[in-house]
Amino acid sequence: MAVSFKGFRDLMPKRTMAEKVLGQALKYLGKDTDKNAKYVLKAVDHIASGEKQEMVREWFHHWMREDGPGRQFLHRVVQNTHPRVRERYVARMVAGMFFRDPDAPGRAEQKFGIQPPPVMLISPTMRCNYRCEGCYAGSYERKDDMDPEVFDRVLTEAEEMGINFITILGGEPFVYPHLFEVLEKHPKSFYQIYTNASLIDEKTAERMVELGNIAPQISINGPREYTDAVRGKGSFDNCVAAMDRLYEAGCAFGFSSLVTSKNMDAICSDEWVDFLIEKGALYGWYFLFMPVGNEPEMDLMPTPEQRDQMRRFQSYVREEKPLLLVDFWNDGVLSGGCIAGGRLYFHINHRGDVEPCIFCHFATDNIHDKSLVEALNSPFFQGIRAEQPFCYNTLRPCPMIDHPQRMWRIIKKHGAEPTHEGAETMFTELAPEMNEYARGVREVMNRAWENEGYKNWAARWMYHCGLPPENIERRRREFEENQTSQEELQESVDPAKKPKQA
Ligand code: SF4
């Protein structure tokens, strides 16, 4: 079927237009890979607007070149997913992430006093059917779940602000009995669900395809011995069986892996990534082990050198494999650094606490007492945004682990309270280890920044990431004077000034 993009541009808001154009293009793809690529690139050419999107458009053309991994990726999208999923999930994801309406932030600011982030994370339950080592999800009960009316209200408020990319976490989201009932009320948004996959039976997979706007992210820690060691015997097989069901049903899915010092080599390997591609995963997220919680095992944290290994592996995968691999820290170069505090995302936990980042368990506001707009406008969140980027070298984006005292200073300044016991440990008891880690990251990543071209393209790109130019300039000067890290690492931690326990 021939589809014309003519007329779309004038008739509808730009994001809707981008979703529609891409949705139509992806929905009607056929078997001819080259023809499909031409068709999708034409759609991308049609919707790209402004300097930033022009750069993205150029990258798309490079990635989708004749022998490029993008062409193969597109072929896999067509092969693996139902047309409805391509239209309602894949197209929205691409439009929302790469081709957002450049005028929307300004319009939103006039209306809400804030530029809303594109992504919201929400954990409606902390319950889980697994009892993984070191995880405290097993201690929660049904009464601790988020009320479905509150979940629904938050999604409504998010949509009103233009936030339509929703990531659902837990606990295990599929144990939450109201999950589909609430999501079905919001068909215009699209959802990533982080799951241990054990509850994805055929019916659940088909239901997600029927809705079209849901993609599970299967949490898997590496080959069988690594996944089973953390999540229990049989958990790896559960993941693989769920992948087969999702593939059969035509559901888009990805994976997420917690990267530790122990599984790094296994996860950063051709064998592992090729296995996931073969199982049908379209994309994946790598998250570093973070020392959050009461007594985190510091030796699980990848070393700075391992983090660099992950960076190199991820760049290699992006250039060579038909899989989109996202590295939550090293991809700071693409997001213009830290995305927390509502700059590009935030998290609401099952109790309604509004946290700046999935790894920063502190809050000043709760969604039961505040609207989403008010929570995103809180002085705490504003304080975080005012400091971003936290470093000119966006390979060191994180105010928690790369500049450990920066987030702690903001937390203390605004009296943010921990949302669970031990949330402050990494800033207090573990400060010496964290400072040492940050020193190592500084050395390794400054070298990469200097020697591998980041100081040219990533620095330029940062100016297109919606950050106040004066913030970038400030960080540039600090970086060039080589002061940033020395100053912050010399700061002593004063545990007496800890915020009071929740
Ligand atoms: S605080 Fe760290 S982990 Fe969280 S978004 Fe910022 S850089 Fe990422």
Image (tube, rainbow, N blue to C red):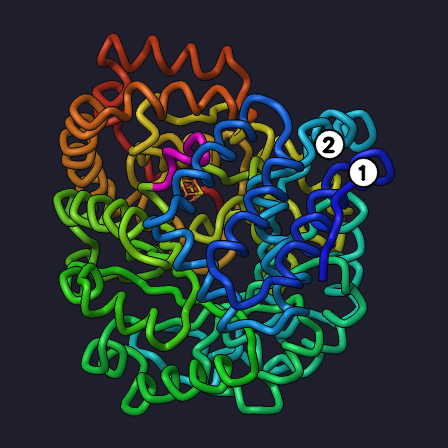
Identify whether 471 is placed above or below 249: above
| Left or right placement of residue 42 versus residue 431 in this view | right
Residue at 66% from the left image edge and 63% from the top image edge: 28
- The image quarter containing residue 275 is bottom left
Q: Position of residue 331 (x, y in %)?
A: 36, 41
Q: Which residue is mark 2?
A: 104
Who is closer to the viewer here, 442 or 222?
222
Who is closer to the viewer here, 238 or 11?
11
Residue at 53% from the left image edge and 78% from the top image edge: 127
Residue 38 appears in the rendering: yes
Residue at 28% from the left image edge and 57% from the top image edge: 289
Say what amino acid the circle numbered 1 marks: Pro
Q: Position of residue 347 (x, y in %)?
A: 57, 52
Who is closer to the viewer here, 173 or 21?
21
Q: Position of residue 186 (x, y in %)?
A: 78, 63
Q: CA distance from mark 2 to mark 1?
A: 9 Å
- The image quarter containing residue 442 is top left
Displayed-image quarter of ligand 1: top left
| Left or right placement of residue 250 versus residue 479 in this view | right
Stretch in magenta: 331-337
Q: Which residue is mark 1?
A: 13
| Left or right placement of residue 469 versus residue 95 in this view | left
Secondary structure under tag 1 reads loop
Q: Are marks 2 and 1 in contact (CB under 8 Å)?
A: yes
Say what amino acid the circle numbered 2 marks: Ala
